[in-house]
Amino acid sequence: MRFLRAAFVSFILITLCACSLTKYVPEGEYLVRKVSVQSDNKTIKTSEIKPYIKQEPNHKTFGLIPFPLYLYNLAGSDTSKWFNRFLQRAGTPPEIYDPVLTERSEREILKMLSNKGYVDAEVQVKVQKKRKKIAVSYFVTTNEPFVIHNFSYIIPNDTLRQLVIADSAASLIRKGDLLDRNILEKERVRLTTKFRNRGYWGFNKDFINYTADTTSHSKKTDLELNVLPQRVLLSDGQEKIVPHSTYRVDRVLFVTDYDPMNVAQESAERDTVLYNGYEIISGKKPYLTNEILVENCMIKPGELYTDRKVDATYSSFARLRILKYVNIRFLQSKTREGMLDCYILLTPGKNQSIQTELEGTNSAGNLGFAASLTYQHRNIFKESETFTTKIRGGYENLTGEGEGLVKKNFTEFGIESGLSFPKFMFPFVASDFKKRIRAATEFKASYSYQHRPEYTRTIAGGGVKYNWQTNRNRYRHSLDLIDISYVYLPYRSEAFIDSIINKNPITYSSFKDHLITRTVYTFYRSNLTPGVRNLDIYTIRASGEFAGNILYSFSNMFNMPKKEGAYNLFGLRYEQYVKFDADYAFTKVLSEKNSLAFHIAGGVGVPYGNSKVLPFEKRYYSGGANSVRGWSVRTLGPGRYRSENPEFDYFNQCGDIRFDASVEYRTRLFWKLELAGFVDAGNVWTIQNYEGQPGGAFALDRFYKEIALSYGMGVRFDFDYFILRLDMGVKAYNPALIGKKPWVIKQPGNKDNYTFHFAVGYPF
């Protein structure tokens, strides 16, 4: 096996080395080998200049090997053969040096520097040729920049001038700053937004310009910001200067069946209804109630126009999943001066959908499959309520030796339903507050049946959840006000019960019938923007979970009797615990086809009061496609705990404390194919020395020695809408072998140290 692997690697290396990089570079032409940038000004980063360079070398996988170019060069010159055509399409042709692009790059860099205030900057280009390859270097000398010496306003309109002066502390332009045109443009946008939010509907940034006066032989600039008046063209062809004025909203009209593809918009079969001061124009079959339309509209008749309320209305209607398009237009009133008619044009989408999913699983050699069917209705009660039902089933064939087991398979069936309302539903709350918070309310219910060789378990649950956004939709919040789960185990094998009691009698309480009533708050923040690439991305997620406190307070208050040391409700022991989780991920874009991703996450759960141990379904586990990838799911930890039969000891390989950290380099190969190299670290621990989990407890003086390490490579297929991922993780440091040889990285030939994972989406 080792010989075959070595032979395969040797063949690949020999093949690549045998392919000359300049195989398809014509005589007299040059392959761009390297492009570099240097600047004498530390405030101007080379990363700022790079986007203005119009010709770069061929993409290098992991920043080292031009694999796509090698692939292209493997193709023969006979394009009639399909294999040659495939290699040419999959690879990338050599980047042939173009002096015109170099000159254009030089001009673009100078333009960028001039916009930042370095008007007298210089760029020197140095070209080095060697055989049929060329290296291009750009040397930037910024010289002395232009700076703002004095800054003043010229605003004839008294009202606008007062608005600007009163808010001058927020100005982006400061005395002594560089004469940066980008900053000047941002200030134009800021003032325009401010004016439009004060009722100046007809104002745009073209009414703002600058006058710069530079003293001779000096880099000091006197800058003036000018706010120009409106110029109206009269019927006789003459222009008339008109001061900017504010506007108020006169009428608000909803058109619920607007067709953006039909300019004429037939209106013969439409009905118009007046509801609470709003006009609603709908077709023969209204699909939204008048109440839900008005409830999501932040624009009110008679109020001063403001962009802020227009944006809030867009955001509010975007939550109505029955709508496909939303367009808001304003027209000046034909009958009332200084008034606007607001048209909210709504286009409905499909209200029902069915989705199926089929997936295969391979967990530690155990083959299985899972299938699901999801039905969704996006307007079940004509208020854009979303009703969702998902049915899921799975089967997995278990191998290995399990004591006392007859049927070596795992089957699962589940159904979950939810009804989501696009509004905040809570008693005794003012309607204005409900409208302002714009929260969605979700009622959910679920049932799951799980059959393993050791036991049969059913979980039934339900709850109420709220979702909302704040800070201009930058922050997302969710609150599970009440979430109830009833765990029932109708069957447990004697061998399984004996195994748990003998190994870990405390954990046995997790495999009895019990009740969980919890409240969960989750915070989420991300700068991820759909459709935007080449942007550094970060996500932050944090949550807190509390269970059983209210029930425990009542039990204490009324001195209810205990059973086996715990309070019960309707004969069921209820759980009491607290959990906190935090997760941070950051992806640094190095170039168009290379990125470096970081991830760190942790959590802790503490049982108390009515519980001695966290419920099994609430405990943490490590290993798997999104954790430490050198291990399969639930085969790592806790701590240095070592299982003799991890396949059937998953109930012991979990804990109360979790830590995960990863770094992953991602590089595009060709077509949809992406390659990744990664290093993972992490483990779980228990908060106490539980019997049956020796070495699993967390301790400050040794936990860092029990952090598992793995590394590996992965192949991903990026189909834009989803990503298929195949990762191979290799154990590097195994804490279960502490005292023996934990650095298993020294045993690369051991097949037990390799684990494969197939998943959808990135691990973080």
Image (cartoon, helix red, strand yellow):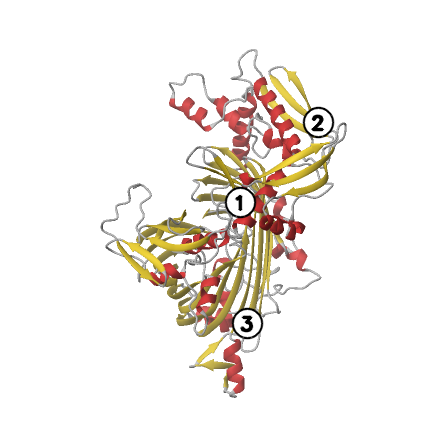
| Residue nearest the observer in this picture, 117 or 52 | 117
- State the CA–CA distance, disc 3 to disc 1: 65 Å
> Is 383 left or right of 242, judged from the image as shown?
left
User: Whole-percent x and y of residue 607?
Assistant: 56, 72
Closer to the N terminus: mark 2 or mark 3? 2
Closer to the N terminus: mark 1 or mark 2? 2
Are the residues at dot 3 and dot 1 in contact (C-beta closer than 8 Å)? no
- For badge 1, the amino acid type reads Pro
User: Whole-percent x and y of residue 432?
Assistant: 46, 66
On residue 243, the disc is: 1
Circle 3: element type: strand
Find the residue positioned furthest to the top: 27
Are the residues at dot 1 and dot 2 in contact (C-beta closer than 8 Å)? no
Q: Which residue is mark 2?
A: 120
Q: Is residue 3 visible?
A: yes
Circle 2: element type: loop
- State the CA–CA distance, disc 1 to disc 2: 39 Å
Circle 1: element type: loop
Closer to the N terminus: mark 3 or mark 1? 1
Q: Quadrant of residue 738?
A: bottom right
Q: At 62% across and 63% down in the image, what residue appears?
A: 695
Q: Is residue 460 above or below residue 673?
A: below
Q: Is residue 649 above or below residue 626?
A: below
